[in-house]
């Protein structure tokens, strides 16, 4: 038994109970809405950590911008010795209390939570018992179904295809939104990093493509996982935009 098993069981019962409450009201859409509401609730509980993380990152960025002239001076002074530039810049940051990994503690603290929630919507069994959440349906499509399952039957059902297509389209839209926001944020920030501009630009391009990994993940994992991904990624983008305006 994993140390996270009690948490998995607890979350499973919470989502199942929420689904039981919503089914009489929403019918067949109840289980899917339960996943969305629960995921949003988890993200709301984690909001204080994300706010603290954003504040730490903003403070670090501001401190680096303040030290930018000193960093440029070091780069000119040791322009023929990149390793010396790196060492002296790191020392300058440490001397001025600039964190090299702002918000890392808050980020790490959330990993177990995301792992548990993700497992609930992906694993066919919980603590050795069948995960009944994946037996529920959304407009006739099992929440435990994969995209490939929709095309394996002897007869293609347009409604089933539409459900999967709409979900993937929603995740793709959120991924595009996230990618655009990341590119916009990167281009407007003052670069005070010790890495070269070319390296920073290359990293920015790579990071901008990462959100589209959720589309691939949703295409190969159960429909329930896709609902979770659509909700949590949309929350992430909206939350980051809100925090950038208020932090």
Image (spheres, grey):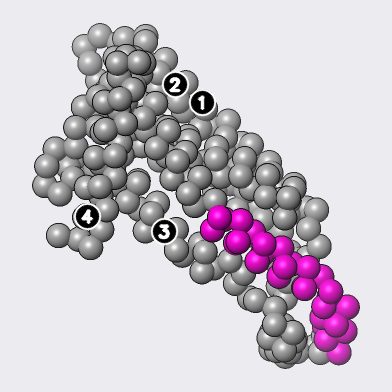
Magenta-highlighted residues = 48-77
Q: Judge the density around disc 3: few (<14), some (14-19), many (≥20) Cα neighbours within 10 Å.
A: few
Q: Which residue is mark 1?
A: 169
Work out whether residue 74 can be spotted: yes
> How far apart, in angstroms, are the residues tagged by discs 2 and 3?
29 Å
Q: Is residue 122 magenta?
A: no
Element at label 2? helix
Element at label 1? helix
Residue located at (84% from left, 74% from top): 66
For residue 46, above or below residue 216: below
> Residue 111 shows which numbered tag?
3
Q: Which residue is mark 2?
A: 165
The spot of residue 40 in percent (x, y) is: 47, 38
| Quarter residue 137 falls in | top left
Q: Which residue is mark 4?
A: 6
**Earlier-in-chain disc, 3 versus 1:** 3
Q: Which of the two residues, 101 or 21, is positioned nearer the viewer here?
A: 21
């Amino acid at each position: 038994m994993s140390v996270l098993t009690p948490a998995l069981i607890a979350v499973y019962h919470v989502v199942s109970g929420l689904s039981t409450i919503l089914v009489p009201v929403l019918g067949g859409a109840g289980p899917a809405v339960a996943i969305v509401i629960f995921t949003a609730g988890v993200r709301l509980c984690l909001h204080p950590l994300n706010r603290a993380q954003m504040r730490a990152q903003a403070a670090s960025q501001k401190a680096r911008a303040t030290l930018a002239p000193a960093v440029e001076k070091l780069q000119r002074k040791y322009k023929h010795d990149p390793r010396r530039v790196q060492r002296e810049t790191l020392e300058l940051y440490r001397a001025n209390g600039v964190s090299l990994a702002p918000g890392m503690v808050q980020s790490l603290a959330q990993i177990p939570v995301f792992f548990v929630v993700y497992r609930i919507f992906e694993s066919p069994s919980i603590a050795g018992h069948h995960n009944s959440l994946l037996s529920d349906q959304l407009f006739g499509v099992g929440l435990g179904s994969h995209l490939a399952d929709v095309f394996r039957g002897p007869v293609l059902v347009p409604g089933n295809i539409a459900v999967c297509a709409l979900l993937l389209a929603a995740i793709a839209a959120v991924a595009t939104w996230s990618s655009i926001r990341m590119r916009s944020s990167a281009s407007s920030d003052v670069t005070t990093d010790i890495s070269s501009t070319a390296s920073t630009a290359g990293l920015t391009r790579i990071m901008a493509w990462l959100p589209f990994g959720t589309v691939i993940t949703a295409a190969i994992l159960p429909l329930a996982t896709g609902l979770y991904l659509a909700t949590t990624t949309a929350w992430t983008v909206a939350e980051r935009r809100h925090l950038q305006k208020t932090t």
